[in-house]
Amino acid sequence: MVERPENSAGKQRGKPFQRGLSGNPAGKPRGTRHKVTLAIEALLEGEAEALTRKAVEMALGGDGPALRLCLDRLAPPRKDAPISITLPPVTSAADTVAASSAVLAAVAAGDCTPDEAGRIMALLAAHKGIVEAGDLARRIAVLEERNSK
């Protein structure tokens, strides 16, 4: 065993503070905003309308970055949109076969993109797993009930 000098601290193991107590309990309150953010807002106070008008004028004048900025703010790209595919009810693991066939048919017909279909298939696979787990739980309960008699 290696001995440490008396004035050296041992290596800290684990968390140094008790749960719920930080090293600075009187620290920054929740919702406090960063000083730089507050300074920027103070500089721009009352100028938002003029700046927006100038950006629109520059965009209309052919300034590419200003045009991109305006379009990104006015019509941001859609991240996700609902799609309409008719799926049969999925109440058993076997029903997922018909549902996945319906998804593939929708892709073939152009009703949804392959990316959208992939996300739907992932949902179907997750739902199938949940349905299978429920089926197994019921079957185990029935078997345990039979064995207890």
Image: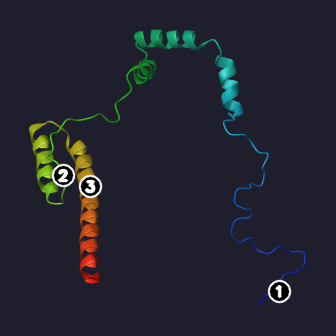
Q: Nearer the viewer, mark 1 or mark 2?
A: 2
Label drawn at residue 3 = 1
Q: Are marks 3 and 2 in contact (CB under 8 Å)?
A: yes
- Pointer 2: residues within 10 angstroms few (<14), some, or many (20+)? some
- Crowd around label 3: few <14 · some 14–19 · many ≥20 (10 Å): some
User: Gap between marks 1 and 2, in whole Å?
Assistant: 67 Å
Q: Disc 3 or 2, which lies upstream in sequence?
A: 2
Give the position of the C terminus as an image quadrant.
Answer: bottom left
Residue 51 position in % (x across, y down): 55, 13
Q: Circle 3 sits on which residue?
A: 127
Q: Earlier in the sequence, mark 1 or mark 2?
A: 1
- Mark 2: which secondary structure? loop
Image coords of residue 75 (percent x, y): 37, 22
Q: Nearer the viewer, mark 1 or mark 3?
A: 3
| Residue in the picture at 15% in, 50% down | 99
Residue at the spot 55% in from the left edge and 10% down from the top edge: 49
Tally the marks. 3
Where is 13 relative to 55, above or below? below
Looking at the rendered structure, the secondary structure element under dot 3 is: helix
Q: Residue furthest bottom?
A: 1
Q: Is residue 54 above or below residue 26?
A: above
> Mark 1: which secondary structure?
loop
Q: Label 2 amino acid?
A: Val
Residue at 25% in and 59% down: 131
The residue at 24%/79% (across/down) is: 146
Asked which colour scheme the image uses, the reply is rainbow
- Which image quadrant is residue 106 in? top left
Q: Which residue is mark 2?
A: 90
CA gap, disc 3 to disc 2? 8 Å
Q: CA distance from mark 1 to mark 3?
A: 59 Å
Q: Amino acid at mark 3?
A: His
